[in-house]
């Protein structure tokens, strides 16, 4: 059975998925606003908040659910979202839930191209979002820096 409208699809979700999606929309909106309004050095600090170690749950399942929420929200917001907005928003959501997520900022330069930047988020286990292109970029910064 094909579900035709976004509202019909939303009704098919459980209450936990709806809450997660609402959190993803709010986090994506905040990350987008912060990135647009404040300097880079401050924008990356927003997602790199202190890890709330008191939060528990199955981290593997939680990481997948949060990634789903950010990707689903990013496809539906009326503004353009790229790796930077998605990365900062997801990092913030993960760290609020006690998962030490690091935002990686990488660049690449091809002589025939212009300088390109890319952001991805990783936990201790794996790259969570943005990993498809990450191998083509050289890491120039990690937020928060390792050891903090």
Image: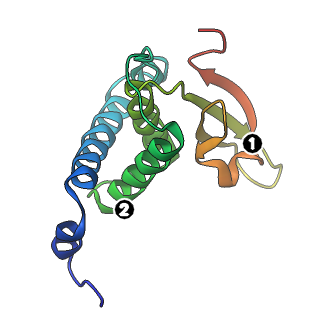
Residue under label 2, please give it: 75
Check residue 137 in the rendering and tell me which mark sits there, or answer none. 1
Question: For this view, does 5 lie left or right of residue 141?
Answer: left
Q: Is residue 120 above or below residue 81?
A: above
Residue closest to the eye, 94 or 13: 13
Q: Locate residue 117: give its quadrant.
A: top right
Question: Residue 44 in the image: x percent, y percent?
Answer: 47, 24
- Does any portion of residue 80 appear in the rendered image? no
Say left or right for 31 vs 109: left
Q: Position of residue 57 (x, y in %)?
A: 42, 34
Report the mark closest to the observer, 2 or 1. 2
**Outermost bottom residue:** 1
Is the C terminus in the top left, top right, bottom left or bottom right quadrant? Answer: top right
In which quadrant will I find the N terminus? bottom left
- Residue 9 to residue 38: above or below: below
Left or right of 145: which side holds 83? left
Q: Looking at the rendered structure, which numbered label has been put on residue 90?
A: none
Query: Residue 67 in the image: x percent, y percent?
Result: 46, 49
- Going 47% across and 38% down the picture, which residue do you hit? 58
Badge 1 crowding class, 10 Å Cα cut-off, few under 14, some 14 to 19, many 20 or more, is some
Q: How is the image coloured?
A: rainbow
């Amino acid at each position: 059975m094909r579900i035709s409208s976004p509202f019909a699809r939303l009704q098919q979700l459980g209450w936990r998925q709806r809450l997660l999606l609402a959190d993803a929309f709010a986090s994506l909106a905040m990350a987008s606003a912060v990135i647009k309004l404040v300097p880079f050095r401050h924008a990356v600090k927003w997602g790199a908040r202190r890890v709330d170690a008191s939060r528990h749950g199955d981290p593997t399942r939680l990481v997948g659910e949060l990634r789903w929420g950010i990707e689903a929200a990013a496809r539906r917001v009326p503004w353009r979202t790229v790796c930077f907005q998605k990365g900062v928003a997801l990092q913030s959501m993960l760290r609020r839930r006690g998962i030490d997520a690091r935002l990686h900022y990488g660049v690449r330069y091809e002589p025939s191209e212009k300088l390109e930047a890319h952001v991805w988020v990783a936990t201790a286990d794996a790259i969570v979002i943005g990993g498809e292109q990450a191998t083509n970029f050289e890491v120039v910064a990690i937020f928060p820096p390792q050891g903090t």
